[in-house]
Amino acid sequence: MKALLKEIRQNPLLWLLVFMPVVFFAAGLKPEAHTLLFVLSVLAIVPLATLLSHATESVAAKTGDAAGGLLNATLGNLTELVIALAALRAGQYMLVKASIAVAIVTNTLFMLGASFLLGWLKHYIQEYKRVSARMQAGMLFLATIALLIPSTMIEVDSAAGAKSSQTLSLGLALLLIVAYALGMLFSLVTHREAYASAAHGEDGEAPWPIGLALGALAGVTVLVALVSEIFVESVQKAAEDFGMTPAFVGFIVVALVGGAAEMASAFSGARKDRLDLSVGIALGSASQIALFVAPVLVLLSYVIGPAPMDLQFWPGAVVMMLIATMTAMFVTVGSRSAWFVGVLVLMVYLIFAMTLYLLPPQLK
Amino acid sequence: MKALLKEIRQNPLLWLLVFMPVVFFAAGLKPEAHTLLFVLSVLAIVPLATLLSHATESVAAKTGDAAGGLLNATLGNLTELVIALAALRAGQYMLVKASIAVAIVTNTLFMLGASFLLGWLKHYIQEYKRVSARMQAGMLFLATIALLIPSTMIEVDSAAGAKSSQTLSLGLALLLIVAYALGMLFSLVTHREAYASAAHGEDGEAPWPIGLALGALAGVTVLVALVSEIFVESVQKAAEDFGMTPAFVGFIVVALVGGAAEMASAFSGARKDRLDLSVGIALGSASQIALFVAPVLVLLSYVIGPAPMDLQFWPGAVVMMLIATMTAMFVTVGSRSAWFVGVLVLMVYLIFAMTLYLLPPQLK
Amino acid sequence: MKALLKEIRQNPLLWLLVFMPVVFFAAGLKPEAHTLLFVLSVLAIVPLATLLSHATESVAAKTGDAAGGLLNATLGNLTELVIALAALRAGQYMLVKASIAVAIVTNTLFMLGASFLLGWLKHYIQEYKRVSARMQAGMLFLATIALLIPSTMIEVDSAAGAKSSQTLSLGLALLLIVAYALGMLFSLVTHREAYASAAHGEDGEAPWPIGLALGALAGVTVLVALVSEIFVESVQKAAEDFGMTPAFVGFIVVALVGGAAEMASAFSGARKDRLDLSVGIALGSASQIALFVAPVLVLLSYVIGPAPMDLQFWPGAVVMMLIATMTAMFVTVGSRSAWFVGVLVLMVYLIFAMTLYLLPPQLK
């Protein structure tokens, strides 16, 4: 508990934890104040995501390298998964899909681009091992194809089309999970030494004791789930109040909320000239969402959703994911980076942000 | 003749030759038993394709390196060509196009992916020369563009569109054949030493005497042509009987039938740590179909078909060929392979197989 | 003045200057002879473009490396810019867009491919520094995405769509200009030594004295502008007279007219085994048009055009620019070239030329 309190004192991000009780209080008192609830829930999720991330790493550090890597890879996007589950329960499949697409694009473009750019502030040219980066880019490419195919091939208007789409999405979800599992087998077991540097994790921060870590993992997950309920309920109306589209709010907010902790790690890695780590976190997180979180949500929609969810995205989302993947593939061909590479990647992100702001996709 | 008999005794695949007389007997006796005829004709073509492949190599081995390479490159996909000619004569242009698209995708993804995966069973990491692989990937890229352009640019509904499509397809066919010829000039004449290793061919098997080889080449081609007639007639109805789509049956069967001999060579190369050879066979065969077989079929459709054939494919086929090419380009950027690369490539193939099984394109 | 006359005597291309007075004379005498005026204006622009190019380089040589590079990069496509401005003033936005798309495709494919091919006539395998090539390819990729997004995402039929398209195009134009400025900062200031070889410019030709150079720069620009007026007025009708489509005439002519001087430099570099220079000119010119000329035209359309111009291209143009960019990215992965690479790149160009000839896009 002392470790937890010490962590909170040192990390200003965690001071936001004060919004935790505030959001529940406000939700009870004024359930119709959507914009307020939206802002409060965002402010409350950010520190929870940070705690969740640290708890996962602490458990991973204790359980040894292979199991720890497995745990880290599985729970690394727990916040995104929990938020998406709340949206799934509410039957808001478009929000689920938007958050998947956005998380992939943000991790690939914004996190990667900003890491390249930040790294330059201290280092003229940075070298990094590209083995891991290319493997992640390859996995992302596979996932993009799996999301591209049903969206381009299916005639949605027919009932038969909807049925086939459902079956195909289920098959693709299983296939992606198998690919993800094989990818972990490859990087954690058979070709482990090639990933030695990337698996190192962020040093510097002392891991928590195992008891605290496990307790925090369980407790914080529950808290994230509770706040997510409020977040999902309020986001739609809040976006309208802001005069923005749900898609754009999702684009900015899901990136901020779900990825805050990972971005902190990636950027700190880049500044320490450990670009391996930054690239690994950015692309690893993107491919995890594409190959693990998204298919798991499809499977869970059969259990907890009002109807099965398929993997058909709106065309703009497919184009964005495809371009993000191609950018990652292009950038990771070389193994050196200078600041302009970061600028190019960030510019692609800005094009998408600008487009979504001005041209809201019809999510309903 | 002794050499032929010895070969048949040693190679279990050739025992399937017994189905040769059976299929002709059955076709005469029960011409309406489509499913039976389909199965029998497939079983009969496999050993014929193997013989054809060995005959070509034997002639190539005798005629010296440059001419042999030329012969090998031209006749390497003779089985596919003969089957497609039977379909062309019958006016089944959709089957012709499907078999072209499928052969490209299967060679690029399945043969390449399985070679990478098989290679790993004996070798931890495999290195290969990427010069040849990248040239083949480049040729494949060119061919994909040539097939992509008419399919995306033409308004099919207008009569003028159909006319332009015809002229454009003819022009593109001639252009692809020129590119193919220049590619052979490059790899067999001007920059030959860069391809030394790939041109080696499969050693171990003794070539046949030239007389036998030439005789076998002529005789077996005729036999393949005869069996192909029965195959093309029966495949459509047989697919319906299986409750499958012609596209899916084509996907599996053309791959198996036409590519059996090449796959055997590619996989054996991979296991002997001669990944150069495997990659060369897989991508070389794909680019040969795209740059030589497909355009030749367009030209021949003016002579033997009921109407000129164009190069417009259904959109799904274009997407698949494009993705297959991009996968080949991505994979051949590096010059090392580990088993997970094979898994990724095979997964892309599985996505396509799954999609075609569930979402049959309208081929009629 | 002597330097100018000497240059004219030595360079046969400049003898075409005699068509300058002829075109003005003809325009005054027979304003309805469109085909004649078209041919004459093309013949007159070619030598002017060459003079403009030499004047720019002479000023650049005098003003020191960073400022000179800046000048060169900004004025390198002055001819294209002036021609496009004439079309912009006339409200012929489709011609403007066609000339942008065509200039990108021609520089990327024709100039690059021909350089690779020509280089081989004297050199078996050519090596080049790929740092600069990859940066240019990356900038081109960014620009293609910026042109792809509005063209794929916007429903043109609605009034709201047209308004959003306008705002988005303006935003993208500003973003591209910022990217272009940062790219110059990168290559001219912070990472300048990596570009040392490419910045060298064409030696051999003595620069003009600064007074002559500045005077020529101003005077020739005015002349190009005057001839462009006649060119833009006549091209549409002339194309009809030739029985060709404006798109095809644009494809051939804009390439010839605007790029003549650059092509001369690129090809001469390739023959001297300075492929760095050729690749730099080809891709640099393409990315300059995409990231500087196109956005500047969008901004200027608010000032001098009858209505704001957006960045929506017809789908075929987007496909062509995307494929050209992918080809450049694929080719610049390696840092060696042999003649077949040139053939492949040129073949892609030929496919586009053939398609545009047979399948005119509806530009009106």
Image (cartoon, coloured by chain):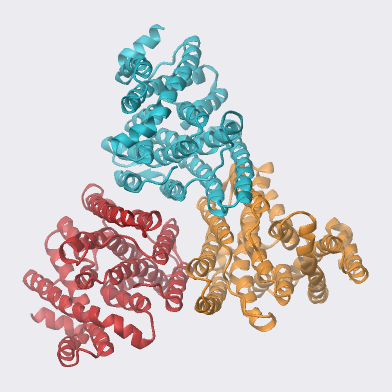
Chain colours: A cyan, B orange, C red
Does residue A279 lie above or below B114 as drawn?
Answer: above
Where residue B307 sits: x, y (%)? Answer: 65, 80
The mark total stands at 0
User: Is B148 left or right of C263, judged from the image as shown?
Assistant: right
Does residue B281 lie above or below A297 as drawn?
Answer: below
User: Is B25 left or right of C87, judged from the image as shown?
Assistant: right
Q: Is residue B335 visible?
A: no
Question: Which residue is drawn at the image coordinates 51% and 21% (left, top)?
Answer: A60
Does residue C26 lie above or below A271 as drawn?
Answer: below
User: Residue B280 appears in which quarter of the rendering?
Assistant: bottom right
Identify the residue at the far left of this view: C211
Where residue A143 sits: x, y (%)? Answer: 53, 43
Question: C174 or A130: nearer the eye?
Answer: C174
Question: C313 or A131: nearer the eye?
Answer: C313
User: Is B52 left or right of C175, judged from the image as shown?
Assistant: right
Question: C337 or A308: nearer the eye?
Answer: A308
User: Residue A53 appears in which quarter of the rendering?
Assistant: top left
Identify the residue at the far bottom of this view: C29
Q: Is residue A284 visible?
A: yes
Where residue B340 sits: x, y (%)? Answer: 59, 42
Q: Quadrant of the image for the N terminus of chain B?
A: bottom right
User: Residue C224 appears in which quarter of the rendering?
Assistant: bottom left
Identify the residue at the far top of this view: A2
Question: A31 or B150: nearer the eye?
Answer: A31
Question: Which residue is drawn at the image coordinates 57% and 56% (left, top)?
Answer: B324
Where residue C336 sits: x, y (%)? Answer: 43, 61
Q: Quadrant of the image for the C terminus of chain B?
A: bottom right
Does residue A82 lie above or below C36 as drawn?
Answer: above
